[in-house]
Amino acid sequence: MRLRGKANYRNLSRYSDYHEKSYSRWFKRDFDFLELNRLSLEYLTDKTMILAVDCSFISYKW
Protein backbone atom coordinates (compact mmCIF):
# COMPACT_ATOMS: atom_id res chain seq x y z
CA MET A 1 0.00 0.00 0.00
CA ARG A 2 1.33 3.40 -0.92
CA LEU A 3 -0.06 6.64 0.46
CA ARG A 4 0.44 10.22 -0.56
CA GLY A 5 1.24 12.53 2.34
CA LYS A 6 1.53 11.57 5.97
CA ALA A 7 0.72 8.08 7.23
CA ASN A 8 -1.97 8.99 9.76
CA TYR A 9 -5.37 7.48 10.52
CA ARG A 10 -7.28 9.97 8.39
CA ASN A 11 -5.09 9.30 5.37
CA LEU A 12 -5.33 5.51 5.88
CA SER A 13 -9.13 5.76 5.99
CA ARG A 14 -9.18 7.83 2.81
CA TYR A 15 -7.83 4.89 0.80
CA SER A 16 -9.80 2.08 2.48
CA ASP A 17 -13.25 1.10 3.65
CA TYR A 18 -12.47 1.68 7.35
CA HIS A 19 -13.06 4.81 9.41
CA GLU A 20 -10.09 6.57 11.04
CA LYS A 21 -11.48 5.65 14.49
CA SER A 22 -11.25 1.96 13.52
CA TYR A 23 -7.54 2.39 12.75
CA SER A 24 -7.04 4.20 16.04
CA ARG A 25 -8.62 1.34 18.00
CA TRP A 26 -6.66 -1.37 16.17
CA PHE A 27 -3.30 0.40 16.60
CA LYS A 28 -3.85 0.49 20.39
CA ARG A 29 -3.97 -3.32 20.57
CA ASP A 30 -0.89 -5.46 21.12
CA PHE A 31 0.22 -7.63 18.24
CA ASP A 32 2.51 -10.66 18.51
CA PHE A 33 4.93 -10.17 15.60
CA LEU A 34 7.06 -13.12 16.71
CA GLU A 35 4.07 -15.44 16.41
CA LEU A 36 3.29 -14.00 12.98
CA ASN A 37 6.86 -14.72 11.85
CA ARG A 38 6.75 -18.22 13.33
CA LEU A 39 3.49 -19.04 11.57
CA SER A 40 4.79 -17.59 8.31
CA LEU A 41 7.92 -19.76 8.49
CA GLU A 42 5.85 -22.80 9.44
CA TYR A 43 3.75 -22.24 6.33
CA LEU A 44 6.88 -22.06 4.16
CA THR A 45 8.80 -25.02 5.64
CA ASP A 46 8.80 -27.08 2.44
CA LYS A 47 10.40 -24.28 0.42
CA THR A 48 14.04 -23.24 0.15
CA MET A 49 14.71 -20.03 2.06
CA ILE A 50 17.65 -17.64 2.10
CA LEU A 51 18.20 -15.00 4.78
CA ALA A 52 20.20 -11.89 3.95
CA VAL A 53 20.92 -9.08 6.41
CA ASP A 54 22.74 -5.85 5.61
CA CYS A 55 24.14 -4.45 8.84
CA SER A 56 26.10 -1.61 7.26
CA PHE A 57 25.65 2.00 8.30
CA ILE A 58 26.55 4.95 6.13
CA SER A 59 26.82 8.35 7.77
CA TYR A 60 25.69 11.24 5.62
CA LYS A 61 26.86 14.79 6.24
CA TRP A 62 24.41 17.34 4.95
Image (cartoon, rainbow, N blue to C red):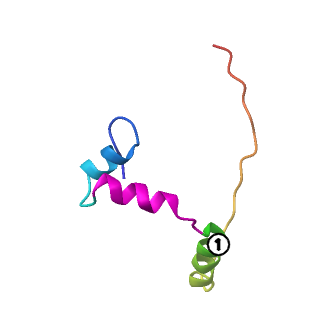
Q: Is residue 21 left or right of residue 29?
A: left
- Across and down, in percent, residue 2 comes to 36, 47
Residue tagged 1: 49
- Across and down, in percent, residue 41 comes to 62, 77
Q: Is residue 24 left or right of residue 28?
A: left
The residue nearer to you, when weighing 21 against 13, is 21
Q: Is residue 28 left or right of residue 52?
A: left
- Across and down, in percent, residue 35 comes to 63, 75
Identify which residue is drawn at 68% across, 15% down. 61
Indicate the amino acid at tag 1: Met
Give the answer, above or below, for where 27 lies relative to 34: above
The residue nearer to you, when weighing 15 against 39, is 15
- Across and down, in percent, residue 53 comes to 71, 53
Identify which residue is drawn at 61% across, 86% down. 46
Magenta stretch: includes residue 29: yes
The residue nearer to you, when weighing 6 against 46, is 6
Per the rendered image, the range of residues in magenta is: 19-31
**Total numbered badges shown on the rendered structure:** 1
- Which quadrant of the view contains residue 25? bottom left
Residue at the top extreme, as displayed = 62
Locate the C terminus and report the quarter of the image it occupies.
top right
Identify which residue is drawn at 35% across, 35% down. 5
| Label 1: which secondary element | loop
- Which quadrant of the view contains residue 11? top left
Crowding around mark 1 (Cα neighbors within 10 Å: few <14, some 14 to 19, many 20+) is: few
The residue nearer to you, when weighing 43 against 17, is 17
